[in-house]
Amino acid sequence: MVASKTAPSQKNTFSKEELLRVYREMLLLRRFEERMAQLYQQGKIGGFCHLYIGQEAIAVAAQHACREDDMMITSYRDHGHVLIRGADPMRVAAELCGKEVGVARGKGGSMHLFDVDHHFYGGHGIVGGQIPVGTGMAFASKYQDTDQVTLCFFGEAAMNQGTLHESMNMASLWHLPIVYICENNRYGMGTAIERASAVEELSRRTACAYNIDGVAVDAMDFFATYECFKQAVDKARNEHRPTFIDALTYRFRGHSMSDPVHSHYRTKEEVEEMRKRDPITILVAYLDENGIADEKTLEEIDAEVKAEVNDAVKRAVEAPAPRLETLYEDVLVEGN
Ligand SMILES: Cc1ncc(C[n+]2csc(CCOP(=O)(O)OP(=O)(O)O)c2C)c(N)n1
Ligand SMILES: [Mg+2]
């Protein structure tokens, strides 16, 4: 049994082409979210909408650390995960706008994105609700001997939900190929972690309680996050041992579209301080300092990404609303 540890910052193992791809992917997530915020303000998106801005290094690092057929499942803060899995940005934007061409046929909205073709299983609105489901997915792949790993994401508020404890106990006992990734942005809506969690250093919890190694990582640093995820994914696949990762991050926007960036629960100074650790800025500094890309190349990539997002949004907004006769479809699955 290994007690909790902090993953050291890692050296880059990526080629120049791969690094530019990582940069493009992080930007895609960021620019997409910025456009979604605008669409929301224009009244084109209704209901709940939780932005991922600030947390991008986690989804991107996870995608690079696993195989395409590995499975991912997460909470309602899910836009980044479904995009990085490979879903068409037009169909994701369309889902947020409630259109029939959306990834969940316009019936799920922002919180319930799904893309089974890309092995993405939602998008779950109940805090911690995806943890037993993800654990079941890992059980299925072990039972069916498919060699797939499940990456199960959740916010730090889910650490105190009963289902997490039951799931982690089973995952350890039954040697399931799963990586539990806590996207620890320090707040559950307006509640700071120190007001909700008796043990704040979350990676200390799982070794003693479930015999699951716990690792904390600076999730604003893409390289450290990637290395940490890679080791955990390999261990899940090769040794059928789960890992718990406390991915230390921050959300730069409000909890959802209904709360301002810095409300009474956190100060403007804190947000500004954390913005200095923007994962994209940190990556850009690395690319610059190591002569991997100059400003012009990075600006060109940004312009391409913005054009891609704008085109996706245009087509999503123009797409038709669901037909009335689809209202009762996908509601009930008839058994034999
Ligand atoms: C079981 C349950 N209780 C309460 C809520 C209301 N709620 C929605 S989001 C949220 C905070 C969750 O915070 P965290 O897990 O840290 O994720 P984050 O939003 O920070 O990504 C709460 C309490 C809910 N959706 N489900
Ligand atoms: Mg949180």
Image (cartoon, rainbow, N blue to C red):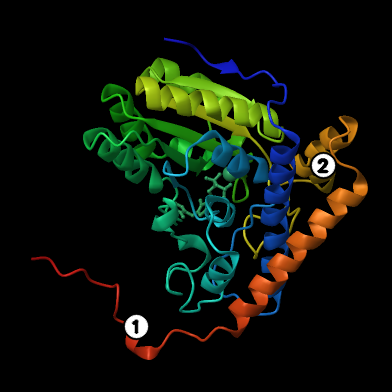
Query: Which badge, 2 or 1, is on the more N-terminal residue?
Result: 2
Q: Nearer the viewer, residue 13 or 97?
A: 13
Residue 281: which numbered mark, if any? 2
Residue at 32 percent across and 29 percent down: it is 176
Q: Position of residue 242 (x, y in %)?
A: 40, 26
Which residue is disc 1 drawn over?
327
Q: Is residue 261 left or right of residue 94?
A: right
Q: Residue furthest top?
A: 1
Question: Among all residues in the image, which is located at the extreme bottom?
Answer: 324
**Lateral position of residue 293 relative to residue 279, left or right:** right
Disc 2: CA contacts within 10 A as few (<14), some (14-19) or many (>=20) = some
Check the image and report above or below for 330 versus 233.
below
Q: Residue at x 58, y 38 (%)?
A: 64
User: Badge 1, how many Cα within 10 Å: few under 14, some, many 20+?
Assistant: few
Distance from disc 2 to disc 1, alpha carbons, whole Å, reads: 44 Å
| Label 2 SS | helix
**What residue occupies the far right of the structure in this picture?**
295
Element at badge 1?
loop
Location of the C terminus by quadrant is: bottom left
Q: Are discs 2 and 1 less than 8 Å apart at CB?
A: no
Amino acid bearing label 2: Thr
User: In the figure, 195 relative to 3: above or below?
Assistant: below
Q: Is mark 1 within 8 Å of ligand 1?
A: no
Q: Is residue 323 left or right of residue 222?
A: left
Q: Which image quadrant is residue 124 in? A: bottom left
Image position of 227 with respect to 126: above or below: above
